[in-house]
Amino acid sequence: MSGLRFLTAGESHGPGLLAILEGVPAALPLLAEDIDRDLGRRQHGYGRGARMKIEQDRAEIVSGVRHGKTLGSPIGLRIANRDWDNWRVAMAVEPVSAEDAAKKTLTRPRPGHADLAGALKYGTHDARDVLERASARETTARVAVGAICRRFLREFGIEVRSHTLALGPVAADPASNERTWEEIGAAEGSPLRCADADLEKKMMEAVDAAKKAGDSIGGAFEVVAKGVPPGLGSMRQWDERLSALLLAAIGSIPSIKGVVIGAGEGAPAAQGSGFHDPIGYDAAAGRFTRPSNHAGGLEGGMSNGEEIRVRALVKPLSTLPRALPSVDLVTKETFEAQVERTDVTAIAAAGVVGEAMTAFVLARAFLEKFGGDSIPETARHHASYIEALRRF
């Protein structure tokens, strides 16, 4: 039997985005509002551009749910692009006149984007064929899928949050930057979803300065998962390691240039005696304990029962109002790169996408371990395992 998996489809300026999530057990309570909540979170954040004022994303569940509960069959989702009316001709499925086809062509690839690499790969002189799918708009569908996975994980006491660690030149001291679960939760709804209010004010000033200069800035965010039981993932093969799956999933998000688990940034300069987390035992709670979590909740490719912490490094967004030089794909002449709508930063949104990908990976690993065609069946398997851990 296949495990949890998903596919997305759709272009940035097409009619909409599609997603199919397969492998969710039957009888999971699920409503469109469970998905729309995270879609709305993805659109917020200081430094976002004009498109977020155009799109008001809502998910339409077209299959896999009946009377508010999943059926166990593939869940189909559709998210309409509200800007579609302005692109009906440029993105039409059927052939259009040469004059109409030329109106939205992009022959000047933008540095930092997929434009040039994709044009060379697919042999097209119109980079719009590339950018429409390479656009971060696709992450809307991922967030929708992740919201369903989040709803599944919540049935078993697992929650996922994120917060902004750094933006441009503004960053906290890494040694004091491990925010608690409660602090991260309190940051939800703030302009940049940063758990340090004083630091956030400086980040907003950095956004304003970059906007005035016609530039963009990079940053970093952290995803934290709480309540993950030990034993998800495996050390048996490289592609079964939960650490590898999380690194790949977070790294697949557009603009991510680095992913670190736990306190991995400090690993090269650390000594083993100070880096590794000592093991203790709480007899009253019947569980093993750690005074620190430098491992980020993962050892040997498996969850160890501590909070899973994954940090992502986000490059400055590639589309710049003050465009960089480029070369025309047709004439080979030097021009200023074409400019689509852009943000100064999308760091708050990037964290939400990171949550979605983390939720998907954890849900898939959870189902691989516990199985079950329905939520009650999965719950029985999970409860039996938790009881076995208490007796261990």
Image (spheres, helix red, strand yellow):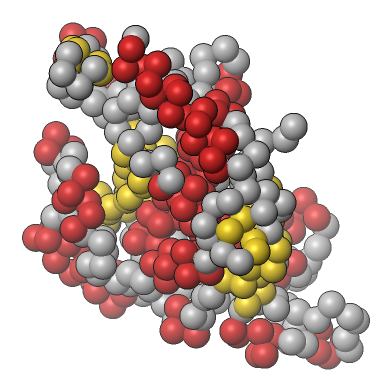
Left or right: residue 33 compared with residue 236: left
> Which quadrant is home to the N terminus?
top right
Q: Where on the picture, by quarter, is residue 386?
A: top left
Residue at x 59%, y 84% (from the top left corner): 82
Total numbered labels placed on residues in the image: 0
Name the spot of residue 309 as percent of width and height, x first. 32, 36
Q: Quadrant of the C terminus?
A: top left
* Residue 206, x across and y down, in percent: 22, 65
Residue 313, located in which quarter of the rendered image?
Answer: top left
| Residue at 90% over, 81% down | 95
**Residue 32 appears in view:** yes
Q: Nearer the viewer, residue 237 or 86?
A: 237
| Left or right of residue 85, residue 53 in this image | left
Name the residue: 33% across, 36% down: 227
Which one is nearer the viewer's eye here, 3 or 68? Answer: 68
Q: Nearer the viewer, residue 118 or 235?
A: 235
Give the answer, above or below, for where 161 lies relative to 225: below
Q: Residue at x 58, y 23 (%)?
A: 240
